[in-house]
Image (cartoon, rainbow, N blue to C red):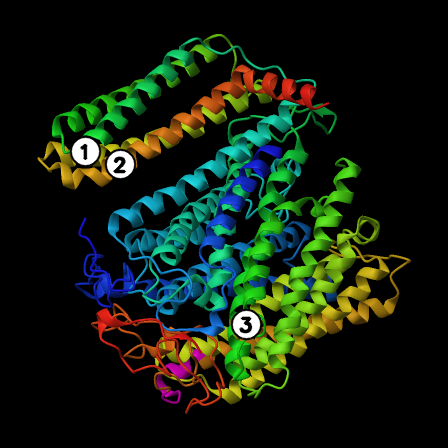
Amino acid sequence: MSVILIFLLAIVAVMLWWLWRQGLFSKPWLEVGVVGGMAAPAPSPSQVARIGLLVFLVVVGSLFALTVSAYLMRSALVDWRAPPLPGILFANTFALLVSSLALQTAKVGARRGDLDSVRTGLLAGGFTALVFLGGQLFAWRQLNAEGYYLASNPANAFFYLLTALHGVHVAGGLVGLGRVTRKMLRGAGVAELRLGVDLCATYWHVLLLIWLVLLGLLTGRIGEFVAICRQLLT
Amino acid sequence: MVDLTHGADGHAAPGHDEELELYHPTNWVTKYVFSQDAKVIAIQYGLTATAIGLVALVLSWLMRIQLAYPGLLAFIDADHYYQFITMHGMIMVVYLLTAIFLGGFGNYLIPLMLGARDMMFPYLNMLSYWIYLLAVLVLAAGFFVPGGPTGAGWTLYPPQAILANTPGQQWGIIIMLVSLMLFIIGFTMGGLNYVVTVLQGRTKGMTLMRMPLTIWGIFTATVMALLAFPALFVGALMMLFDRLLGTSFFMPSIVAMGEQLPTGGGSPILFQHLFWFFGHPEVYIVALPAFGIVSDLISTHARKNIFGYRMMVWAIVVIGALSFVVWAHHMYVSGMNPGFGFFFATTTLIIAVPTALKVYNWVLTLWRGDIHFTVPMLFALGFIVTFVNGGLTGLFLGNVVVDVPLSDTLFVVAHFHMVMGVAPILVIFGAIYHWYPKITGRMLDATLGKIHFWVTFLGAYAVFFPMHYLGLLGMPRRYFEMGETAFVPPSAHTLNEFMTIAALVVGAAQMLFLFNLAWSLRHGKEAGGNPWRATTLEWQTPETPPAHGNWGPELPVVYRWAYDYSVPGADRDFLPQNDPWPGEPAPAPDTAVAEGAR
């Protein structure tokens, strides 16, 4: 459970820092008047949406940190037999990377008010994300064809579980992206699209990051890295 | 994005919130059924949770009758008994307590206490309720599927939960897991709302340290729930894979009836880790809102500011953080590495420090206060006593050497019922008596309320106090019937009968409460806007019950913290948070300046 604890430690640290800045040490009983300690925020819809997404991403992070914790606990046992990784996973990773970059382009374009790069970014981002999902399905089929079935052993089951959980999140993101794209195709201006594009880009970056961690885990690279760190410490 | 008009002090002027568009209901259905108004959603949550809670109440009656008079009700066999245990536990912990504190009180109080018009994402909020309702309906459907609901115990430990011969193995366990996953999805939607509303929805002048402790409790509990529920989600998903797709996440190699089952290689302990990583924070997800609400009840009804407000806030935050590193104290007898036990015993005992601090502060708030023995106050006092009681037995169980012999006895049952069953429910009752006048505009009948309190309070003690003794005798929990057992004296059976009669009486007293709720809706005394003369913002709304949008044309401006009771020199014994005393009343919107320390 060390992964989830490290994740939580980071969250707690950020929260404590934020609370401290919000005047956790102020003495509210002595302060009368409108300003007491830190000002209450003035909500704007875009900021509210951004913070909403951020909180949601923390929940998603917690979900994956827990799944990874479970993976590491189980994979530490001696009978762990990881399935060979289909090579297409690396191509998929590249597709997701391109997707993320495309949405970043769209985001930057939206900031500049450049509708063309928003259009290109959104369409390219959506397409490459679909390619990623298709590629993941192909990887499943390949493993299945080679006889590494879901129920054959826990390592296989974890492989399918992790990729499925991540895939579902990408698919959910595509719903949001689809809505923004539809709005764009119906002729919405850059100002109307800015928030949606921004949120999609953030979500995509985080999903890319999570995927890279999962990939590192599945290829065993993270395990090796942890082992090296442990040796250095001892 | 429209830029806000900022006042001289950097705040938005009141009333300048038109850019956050409020949703407006157009007909009866959007106003009362598919409503996006947090107040309506709160009532929907409350009623649904109460309805399913009554099912849990009846199940507890059936269990108690079986324990005291085995064989009296012929339809209760061992399988049914386990199904009743499981459903009673799961309903009470998740579908009643979590839902009513966060979905019910959270929805009602967060916008009102913070001076907001509504939650930040009203549509998501509505969706949250309907998914919760779906989860409850799916759960209840478990009673009607072939084989009945699961009888795996509320902890759903694998492998037994999904093995043949466990009641409800066929459909019940699937129903339970799906329902839990739905609940978590619905809760996440609501939880996002509560957190973001606290972060972004506070009105002018409402700093974090001016928030009532109720909001601190609900806020912290929601953050914890958002982080902890994914553990249950992952666990449930993996078990669902095991049950439906034949994987072996949690299923070791098993030989049953001389036959090797196809599963193998799974780790049952892994599920226990995931479950309790959710399960222990869950205790505090229920307890923290209760702590917060009780602080407000005590302060209001003792006409005294809360003692040590800052410490109370810090304690809530510290308890929230610590509760994530104590989970394995539920697993001392699971066969995990014994070295862990020492670590988790230590963290468990450390968490008692901020908790005890809160108890001291409640008592010191009461000290020399002007205590009014209103019904909410009685329930709040009942809570303190009960919580201390349950907390102390928690210190016993937190120690490995004491826990091992007591584990799996009724002592544990008595402990957790006291600390997270009876205690939070007393708070829920107190809170309903306290806020009912705001929700409906009428007071609940006080005489009925006092009868309800005394029967519930004394009755709950009559049920659970003797249970500690039975546990110390070594009477095991989860047993359908005791049979002839040498170490259990006949007097224990008499005690069991006494507890069952008490449980039946306590349950019946709740009907009195439900009657009071319904009767007072029409015949209760008119409450007026602020019957308890309380300081917090929800009592200062222009209308009671608060209208859609809560605040009329202008949002309130907050000038002080939530606990200015009996302030020397003031003409009333309470100063509402939006009262600028001793400054000018109602300053012009853009010129409000700090009054400085008094």
Q: Quadrant of the C terminus of chain A?
A: top right
**Stretch in magenta:** B517-526
| Quarter of the view holding residue B306 | bottom right
Does the magenta portion include B523?
yes
1 or 2: tag closer to the N-terminus: 1
Query: Which three-letter amino acid code belongs to the residue tagged 3?
Result: Ser
- Residue behind mark 1: A110
Q: Which residue is mark 2?
A: A198
Which element type, helix, strand or loop, lies under badge 1?
Answer: helix
Please tell me if label 2 and label 3 are on a single chain. no
Q: Position of residue B564 (x, y in %)?
A: 47, 79
Residue extending furthest toward the left: A187
Q: Position of residue A53 (x, y in %)?
A: 35, 42
Q: Position of residue A33 (x, y in %)?
A: 37, 73
> Which of labels 1 and 3 is toward the front?
1
Principal secondary structure, stretch drawn in magenta:
helix
Residue under numbered circle 3: B295
Residue B410 makes an appearance in the image: no
